[in-house]
């Protein structure tokens, strides 16, 4: 952009076309003298947008023109003008008008003797972002209220369940009671999973170089007793490779993938989970493979969808892999899944390598 304006302005100073060049452009331009800071030219886009009288700007200092041009964003615009004095490029958002509300994105660049301020209308983007923020806050409030009310209802239901003595119930009533109890437990798991999901995807992400094998070994220790209980084995193949990760998010990812491998193990063979960590084209690839039940080929595409369930009769909410995918993407990574030669699943994760 700087080269474009430098070349265009310099080439037109000798043929008298400079005024036309400024006037006809479909975005705002202000040219200032670098030494004095006074405005030399301002184009029609800004004159019409800000309802300006160009002669009122003649001979005014930077501070005076800042007040005249952008009184509602005077601090931001004054900062841009300070960067002009040290001849450093700068970019800032400015509120141009309140009624109707108009926002401009301003980029500061330079020629040999002048500074050039380029203004683009970003009102639609600013308003859309604000509306999205409002909807997000409303959704957050709704989620908290809904969670609170459902938990209250569950707590009451548990109270009634606790009053019943299973030993005194007739067989038919005991069957109904068992169904009610299972339903209560399922609802509790769904509410807890939804709240954990919400907290995880809204927590702050802090990417830093992390030793991937060290994190994996720590999680394998965490699952040691659970693996022993099902006679399972976990194998790690890796050098000491570092990736740019958020440690808490990567921990949630590992726990979901390893617990799924344990949960969906096959009854026909001993559970073996294999993890590999290696570098591919300046990225760190982590694969998590199991020899469990697997899924049908046409189910692969729905694995990461919320509330997706590929196996019946096994406890779960169908949110785990959707959460994993969102956390991977928040760390600028990628995830995919394929059916391996042993009939189980292999999850392939890629992250940015340490620079």
Image (cartoon, rainbow, N blue to C red):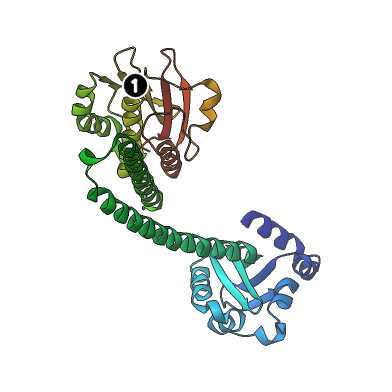
Vertical order, 290 against 223 (above or below): above
What residue did someone put label 1 on?
265
Query: Residue 228 at x, y = what percent?
Result: 19, 22
Vertical order, 214 against 23 (above or below): above
104 on left or right of 270: right
In this rendered view, identify the residue nearer to me: 40 or 13: 40
327 on left or right of 52: left
In this rendered view, identify the residue nearer to me: 153 or 256: 153
Query: Residue 129 at x, y = what percent?
Result: 55, 61
117 on left or right of 256: right
In this rendered view, identify the residue nearer to me: 80 or 60: 80
Vertical order, 128 against 289 (above or below): below
Q: Quadrant of the C terminus?
A: top left
Q: Quadrant of the N terminus?
A: bottom right
Residue farthest along the bottom direction in this orientation: 56
Residue at horizontal 73 percent and vertical 71 percent from the top: 45
Name the secondary structure under disc 1: loop
Q: Say which quarter of the image contains residue 14.
A: bottom right
Query: Residue 220 at x, y = what percent?
Result: 23, 29
Q: Is residue 80 visible?
A: yes
Q: Say which quarter of the image contains residue 232.
A: top left
Vertical order, 141 against 318 (above or below): below
Query: Residue 49 at x, y = what percent?
Result: 70, 75
Q: Mark 1: give few (<14), some (14-19) or many (20+) Cα within 10 Å.
A: many
């Amino acid at each position: 952009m700087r080269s474009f304006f430098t070349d265009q302005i310099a080439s037109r100073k000798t043929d008298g076309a400079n005024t036309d060049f400024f006037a006809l452009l479909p975005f705002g331009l202000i040219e200032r003298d670098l030494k004095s800071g006074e405005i030399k030219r301002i184009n029609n886009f800004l004159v019409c947008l800000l309802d300006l009288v160009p002669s009122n700007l003649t001979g005014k200092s930077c501070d005076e023109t800042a007040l005249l041009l952008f009184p509602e964003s005077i601090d931001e615009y004054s900062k841009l003008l300070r960067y002009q004095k040290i001849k450093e490029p700068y970019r800032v958002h400015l509120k141009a008008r309140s009624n109707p509300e108009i926002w401009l994105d301003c980029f500061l660049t330079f020629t040999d003797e002048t500074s050039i301020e380029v203004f683009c209308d970003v009102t639609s983007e600013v308003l859309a972002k604000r509306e999205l923020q409002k909807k997000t806050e409303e959704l957050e409030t709704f989620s908290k209220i809904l969670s609170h009310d459902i938990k209250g209802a569950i707590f009451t239901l548990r109270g009634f369940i606790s009053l019943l003595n299973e030993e005194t119930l007739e067989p038919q009533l005991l069957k109904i009671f068992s169904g009610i109890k299972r339903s209560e437990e399922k609802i509790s798991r769904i509410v807890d999973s939804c709240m954990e999901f919400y907290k995880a995807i809204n927590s702050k992400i802090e990417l830093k170089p992390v030793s991937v094998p060290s994190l994996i070994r720590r999680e394998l220790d965490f699952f040691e007793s659970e693996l022993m209980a099902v006679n399972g084995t976990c194998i790690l193949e890796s050098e000491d490779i570092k990736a740019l990760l958020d440690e808490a998010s990567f921990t949630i990812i590992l726990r979901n993938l390893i617990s799924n491998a344990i949960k969906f193990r096959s009854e026909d063979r001993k559970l073996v989970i294999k993890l590999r960590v290696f570098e591919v084209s300046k990225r760190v690839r982590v694969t998590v493979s199991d020899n469990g039940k697997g899924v049908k080929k046409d189910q692969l595409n729905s694995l990461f969808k919320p509330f997706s369930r590929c196996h019946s009769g096994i406890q779960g909410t169908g949110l785990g892999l959707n959460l994993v995918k969102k956390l991977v993407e928040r760390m600028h990574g990628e995830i995919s899944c394929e059916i391996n030669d042993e009939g189980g699943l292999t999850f392939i994760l890629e992250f940015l390598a340490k620079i």
